[in-house]
Amino acid sequence: MKLATATVVGALALCVGTMITFAQAGKHPVDQPTSPPKPSDTHQPMSPDEMQKMMEEYRKANMPGPEHEVLRRLIGEWKVHSKVFPGPSVPPMESKGEGEGEAEYEGRFVELEAEGEMMGQPWQGKYLLGYDRFKKHYTVAMWSNVTTAMNHGTGSYDDASKTITYEVRMDDAHGDRATKFTIRFNADDTHVIEAYDTVPGMGQIRVMEAVFTKDD
């Protein structure tokens, strides 16, 4: 594994070096001419100071920001009380479980793992949450032990309601459709995750609610 890791790191370093070389030349590798370029087509390579400045700007642009502080509220160990809503006139099915949130890569992401029951069966799932500072939106990837799909979504944060709302595209046995996934942060240090699915003839309805309470 160490050898494989070293090989991958070396390959990445070589790729980065190649990209910088061609960036300095103002050309993409596939665009390189077969004959020597004319003097007017060449560019001066970056000086060490310019390279250092560029790298520092890149580093600052990729540091966690205030948007990531919102996600930090998910960090910790949690007790989870879940409800699944089978239909409008059917009582919800309730269950209890546990969850844990951890910061990843110096706070750039938060991984939230939960386990309990879903429809009477053991359920385990993970959420990887972040904020893309370039595209200016929240991101989420979700996967679990009851599906082979990994679902992705993007969202925005409403400070008034302390809620992140994600739009997630689902594609499963029930077809391709738009769904919604929200995280609401309460003043008592709890948070609530809700899932909304699109049902033919009914529109988008809530199908799941999970309340996360600190496990002291």
Image (cartoon, rainbow, N blue to C red):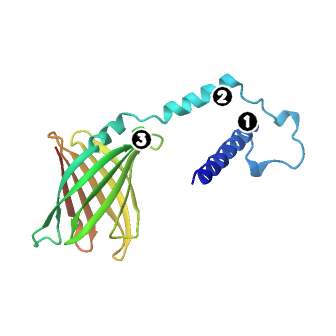
Task: Say whether disc 1 or disc 3 marks the residue closer to the N-terminus.
Answer: 1
Residue carrying label 1: 24
In the rendered structure, the answer to whether residue 163 lies left or right of residue 81 reads: right
- Is 43 placed above or below 128 here? above
10 Å crowding of disc 2: few (<14), some (14-19), many (20+):
few
**Hey, what amino acid is under mark 1?**
Gln
**Hey, what amino acid is under mark 3?**
Arg
- Viewer-nearest of discs 2 and 1: 2
Residue carrying label 2: 51
Task: Say whether disc 2 or disc 1 marks the residue closer to the N-terminus.
Answer: 1
Give me the C-alpha separation between circle 2 and circle 1.
Answer: 10 Å
Looking at the picture, how far across and down is residue 23, in whole percent?
71, 39
Residue drawn at (67%, 49%) of the image: 11
Residue drawn at (44%, 41%) of the image: 105
Looking at the picture, how far across and down is residue 181, in whole percent?
29, 56
**Label 3 residue SS:** loop
Looking at the picture, how far across and down is residue 80, in whole percent?
19, 55
State the residue lying farthest toward the right: 35
- Is 97 placed above or below 183 here? below
Where residue 178 sits, quadrant-wise, is bottom left
Quadrant where the N terminus is found in the figure: bottom right
10 Å crowding of disc 1: few (<14), some (14-19), many (20+):
some
In the rendered structure, the answer to whether residue 88 lies left or right of residue 178 reads: left
Quadrant where the C terminus is found in the figure: top left
Give me the C-alpha separation between circle 1 and circle 3.
Answer: 29 Å
Instruction: Check residue 46 in the rendering and tell me which mark sits there, or answer none.
Output: none
Residue carrying label 3: 108
Task: Say whether disc 2 or disc 3 marks the residue closer to the N-terminus.
Answer: 2
**Hey, what amino acid is under mark 2?**
Met
